[in-house]
Amino acid sequence: MSNPALILIAALSLYSGPVCAALPVEGLVLPFRQVEVAAPVSSRITEMKVREGEAVKEGQPLALLYGRLEELEAQRAKILLERREFEAKGARKLYESRIIPEAKALEARIDLDLARLQYETAAEQVRLRTILSPMDGVVVTRAREAGETVASAQPLFRILDLSKVVVQVEVEPRDLAATALGHRVRVSFPLAAQPLTTEGEVVLLDPCADARGLVRVKVLVENPERRIRSGIRAVVELALPPQP
């Protein structure tokens, strides 16, 4: 277990600029965003496209599910759609030439609309067999392997977005008198692989205190090089109210 006092001393030693009245508070680094990606349908995994620890982009395939029957249905629906398009086009020309009544042309157009909906439905069933990443991030959990069967809504991946991190601290309400949303505060990461000090923006001042009487404060810190890892300790220096 880390000694909080040593962490605070190490954090303050990283900064060599002028000393300002500030309250150093130890907190925990959280990912900016994290999502669990689940299987949209029940099926068998045919291929896993990514590994744990791999960086992914939004829209990148993560896994493939068995979908041969859905592909065949989509092909059938596409052929039927092409047929209905041909029939509707012919019916429109016949109606314009006064050969068939308007009701017949309308019936052909309705059949075309239904065929188009059937094809879109079948195509969507095919698309659901490819699981895509909902955001840029890093795959930290891969819960299944190729060949396994998954149920609908069963989690398969957990992805973290670490392009930014959130440092969460808990402080007493009286220590927040000089802090407001949008304030820039100094944040230190003495236990990071490469200890550093940077700035962050206060993005949350919890309006409710917890059972201990402490208030949650969240500070957003840019992390473009992914040097700051989720789960490590950090120190936030909150501004102190002026002394009377």
Image (cartoon, rainbow, N blue to C red):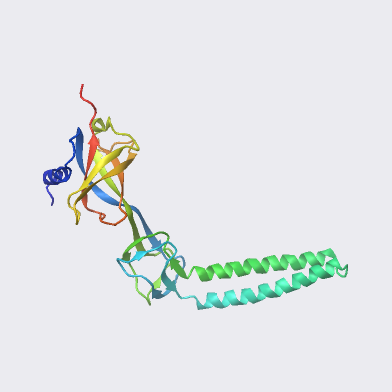
Q: Position of residue 147 (x, y in %)?
A: 38, 77
Question: From this viewpoint, which residue is outermost toward the right?
Answer: 98
Q: Is residue 212 visible?
A: no
x, y percentage for residue 36? Answer: 37, 60
In this orientation, which residue lies closer to the viewer: 57 or 106? 57
Q: Quadrant of the C terminus?
A: top left
Farthest residue, direction front = 17
Question: Where is residue 179 shown, x and y percent of the image?
Answer: 29, 33
| In the displayed structure image, the side of residue 83 where residue 48 appears, left or right | left
Classify residue 1 as left or right of residue 157. Answer: left
Image label count = 0
The structure residue drawn at horizontal position 43% and vertical position 60%, both measured from the top left corner, is 134
Q: Is residue 241 above or below residue 53?
A: above
Res 111 → quadrant: bottom right
Q: Residue at x 20, y 35 (%)?
A: 22
The residue lying toward the viewer, choosing from 113 and 182, is 182
Rendering quarter of residue 136: bottom left
Q: Is residue 41 left or right of residue 123?
A: left
* Identity of the residue drawn at 20% across and 40% down: 25
